[in-house]
Amino acid sequence: MADVKITVKPNGPYRVEGVVKLVDAEGREWDLTGKPAFSLCRCGASTTKPFCDGTHSKLGFQAAESAVRKEEAAKGQAPPPNPVTKM
């Protein structure tokens, strides 16, 4: 499988880049033909789930805390702030 990159957008979706297989709970595969990248909804309000439709920005969605790396947690350190980037 080719390299896959998943980027957590601040207070936004998960941006997926690369060749992946996306399967629903019933085992049906989504057709991602021609989509080298797509965004997955993280706020739960998208009308095009599992894909992001931008609704998070209208709702003022605030994501949960950033993940803390094991090494940082052991030292009692917070993770560095995520840079804000546009989708």
Image (tube, rainbow, N blue to C red):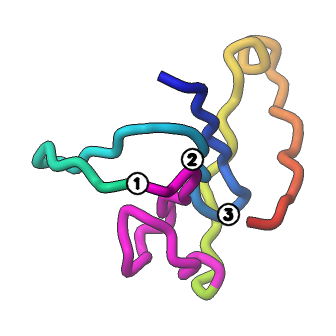
Region in magenta: 33-57
Mark 2 crowd level (few <14, some 14–19, many ≥20, 10 Å Cα) = some
Front position among marks 2 and 1: 1
User: Residue type at mark 1?
Assistant: Thr
Front position among marks 3 and 2: 2
Camera-side residue: 57 or 28?
A: 28
Name which of mark 1 and mark 3 comes first in the sequence.
Answer: 3
* Residue annotated with mark 1: 33
Does 51 appear in magenta? yes
Identify the residue shown where x is 23% and y is 48%.
Answer: 29
Residue 53, percent across and down?
51, 77
In this image, 53 relative to 50: left or right? Answer: right
Which quadrant would residue 61 be assigned to in this image? bottom right
Image disc number at residue 66 = none
Marks 3 and 2, Cα distance to the nearest angstrom?
Answer: 16 Å
- Mark 2 residue element: strand
- Mark 1 residue element: loop
Note whether 15 is above or below 5 in the view shown.
below
Note whether 86 is above or below 65 in the view shown.
below
Image disc number at residue 11 = 3
Note whether 5 is above or below 74 in the view shown.
below
Name which of mark 2 and mark 1 comes first in the sequence.
Answer: 2
Identify the residue shown where x is 61% and y is 52%.
Answer: 15
Does 13 appear in magenta? no
Image disc number at residue 16 = 2
- Mark 3 residue element: loop
